[in-house]
Structures are given as C-alpha cells and as structure tokens.
Amino acid sequence: MLKIGHSVTRPGKKAQDPPVVLNVPEELETAPGIVQRPAEVDFYSREYPLELANVETTADRDWEWPFHSQELNDFHREHERLNRPLVEACRATTDLEPTATPVPGKDVSELIKTKARELGIGEVGITQLDRRYVFKFIRGYVKYQHAVCIAYEQDYEGTQGAPGMSAERPHFDTYREMVPPILALGDYIRSLGYNAQVHHPDDNVVATVAMFMQAGMGQLGANGQLLSPHFGSRARHTVITTDALVTYDEPVDYGMHAFCDICQVCVNRCPGRALMRDKVWWRGVQKHKLIYRRCRPVIARYEGCAVCMKVCPIQRYGMKNVLDHYAATGVVLGKGTHGLEGYTMKDKGYFGPGELPRFSSDFFDMPHGRSEDVAFEELKDRIKEGDIPDGAEGDQALREFKERVEQYVKMPLNFQGNPQDEYAKQE
Ligand code: SF4
Ligand code: SF4
C-alpha cells in the first residue's frame, strides 16, 4: 500500500450523494492545478492571444467535409437546427437584468453551487474570469469579472463506443441537454440580485480547462482534457460570467499531473499518434501537447474519434476508484485490458492493447490555418510557376482568387465564429 500524501473531499456526483474522499498517494503529489510560469502565460496571452478554432483553422474545417458520412452530416444538421434557438437563448441573457436586490455583503457562492447541483450539473466551481483565456474574436462580448465553471456529464454508454456515431451523438446531444440547466442557473443568479451572462457550451468563449483547474475542478490529462473526479474528461464545459458576490475556489492537486506520466494509456492508444509521451512547456504551462495535424485527420474521418476520452481510466472508472487501486497495487486500473483499451474503427477493424491502425502517408495531408491564407499560398505557388500570365487569362485567375477570398472574409459569422449557415455552404 502506497503512503497517502493528502486527501481531497469533493461533493458527490449527484446532489443527494455523500461527499467523496480522494486519497492521493505521496508519490503522485506535484502542484495544485497545473505547473506553470505565470509571467510566460501573461506574455503569450498578450502577444499571441488565444483564438477560436472556428476562426483560426477554417482551412481544415472546409477540407474535412468530403470525409463525413451522410449519417454524420444529417446528425450535425439536425443538431444545428435544434441548437440554434438554444444559442440565441444564451445570447439573450447578455441583456437581462437582475430580478431582485442583492442582500448586502452576503456571499452567494454556496447558494450557486447548491443550485447547480440540484439542476444536475455534476461539477461546478467558481473563479475569476481570466481574460488571458478569453478568445480574441469574442473578447468584447464577454461581461463580468467572475466565472461559474460548469462541467456537465456526457452519456457513459455511448462514449464507450468511440470512435463512431455512438460517441458522437452524446457529444453533441450534451451541448443541447445542458442548456436548460445553465439557463436556469443564470435565472437563479439574477434572482439573487446579480447579473449573469450564460455562455453556450458549443464552442466556448474561454479556454475552459485552464480556468476549471483554477476553480479546483480537476487537472489536465495527457489527452488534453480536464480530468475531474466523477467522470474525468467525459463532460462538456461552459461558464456563466457574473458580478455576484462570490469567493473563489482554489486549485487542487488530485495527483493527475504525475499519474498521467505513469498511465499513458491515451498516448499508447491514440490512432493518430497525436499525443505526446512527455510534457513540454507551452504558453507558460507544463503539459502534454496534442499534435493537431495528427489528430484532425483522424477526427475528420472517424466521427470525432474520441478514443483518448474513451480509453482514459478516470473517465471509465472515476478518479476515486483509480486512485484507490493505484494506492493499493501500484497498477493503473484497466491498463492493458481489452475492456478499457480496445476499440473498433470502421474500415480498419478491432484494435486491442498494443495494436494500432496504420494509415498511408498522405492520410495526414491537410491544409493548415485560415482558408483565405491557404488560397493566397496557392496563388503564390502559381505565380512562382508562371501559371498567371499577363493579359486576360491572368486577370481571370486573379479575379477568381479575389472571389474565393471574398467568400471567406465576407462570410457572415455567428458570435462563436461559425459560418452562420455551415451547411448551406456545402450545398
Ligand atoms: S481524438 Fe483521436 S486522434 Fe485525436 S488525440 Fe484523441 S485519440 Fe488521438
Ligand atoms: S488515459 Fe491515463 S494518461 Fe491519458 S489522460 Fe487518462 S489518466 Fe492521463
């Protein structure tokens, strides 16, 4: 039995559940939240601000469409149809006024958290709205100085079927399912006398994991996702920003920073070899950095992939069970078993522990960055090759380039940086 270094008590998974005590072995202790160099975080957020993927990586988003199955496109289209009024409802909270007068000096943190749990929100924490993590595209939109951080559980059964539609459906369904509870929580905060801006979870206004760690809700896993106590990374995130009188939660060391170095299941099982075995310093934090160009081609062809979520023991068994098993045996629960590590990829078959699919070298070829920048690079190549002659033919080529760029830069975007009608574009 390993020596326990410290224990963390968290509320139970459901409102009526008793608290859970997580015993962190001494050998897994590192730092609360994440290991970071604050001056570097400041520097990168100031000089290289974070941007929405919807804005910054439009080229590969356009590129991936032909790989989608009809079933996936139909499902996403239906999601868009059902989701749009929910996005509008969240956006409308920006202009709502408090419905009561606040009790002077009364801290409402526990009231908000209790209400959140009554509404079925599995993990909730409160911290400062850290503007270093608000996406550049949307900075002017986000109001208020505090963030109520919300992790809403995604369906267990469906997620275990990743990669495929069985996991992709709950992924998007969760974005819609959690909207009524978060709107209700926003109403509740306003009933306490404060403003509450509810942000839709489907493409967030902030890099949530950084703030959720600050709010003590979990730690960053090697899969790039928040490992929270009850459902690990099997959750969808959002924040409600507010001016309510609150107390901030503190970051917590759950032992995950060190545990991931030992576990490595997601790293070993990633079909795209997109996860790193070792941590690096990235934008001022020490983390396992996902390699986007190796992940995106898999996501595009295999319904969002999510193998790294499915094979994570914290997601599968819960953090308490995994920590207790490790403390008792020194072994990662489920590691090396078909039950945890096995998955099936359409057209490739089943892969058990130690087995990975192979892809041809051109599988990972995809355009990078913004669509208009890719169009410009292609034009430069044509000019280099003498493919844009003087005269009418060259003029026509330049006109076509201009029309292509116009299509990208004049496309109406919704407030999340998505084209307003993503699907109309494909028809
Ligand atoms: S989504 Fe798939 S390809 Fe991307 S990191 Fe996770 S396991 Fe790897
Ligand atoms: S699978 Fe293991 S290494 Fe990967 S995030 Fe989960 S606990 Fe960490």
Image (cartoon, rainbow, N blue to C red):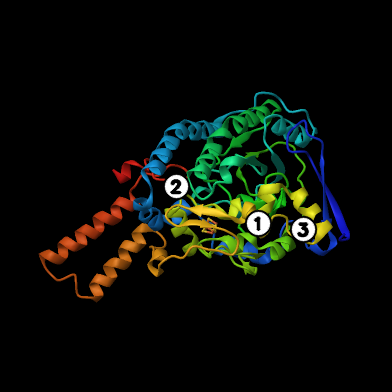
Which of pointers 2 and 3 indicates the residue nearer the eye?
3
Of all residues, the one furthest to the left in this rendering is 392
Q: Which residue is mark 3?
A: 255
Which type of secondary structure does the marked residue at label 3 adopt?
loop
Frontmost residue, 3 versus 296:
3
Q: Residue at x 54, y 52 (%)?
A: 306
Of all residues, the one furthest to the top in this rendering is 100
**Mark 2: amino acid:** Gly
Seen in the image, is 284 located left or right of residue 392? right
Return the x and y of residue 230 as percentages of the image width and height. 71, 44
Seen in the image, is 87 located left or right of residue 339? left
Return the x and y of residue 37 as percentages of the image width and height. 69, 66
Q: Residues within 10 Å of mark 1 (few under 14, many from 20)?
A: few
Q: Residues within 10 Å of mark 3 (few under 14, many from 20)?
A: many
Q: Which residue is mark 1?
A: 337
Q: CA distance from mark 1 to mark 2?
A: 41 Å
Q: Residue at x 80, y 32 (%)?
A: 106
Q: Is mark 3 within 8 Å of ligand 2?
A: no
Return the x and y of residue 136 as percentages of the image width and height. 52, 53
**Mark 3: amino acid:** Gly
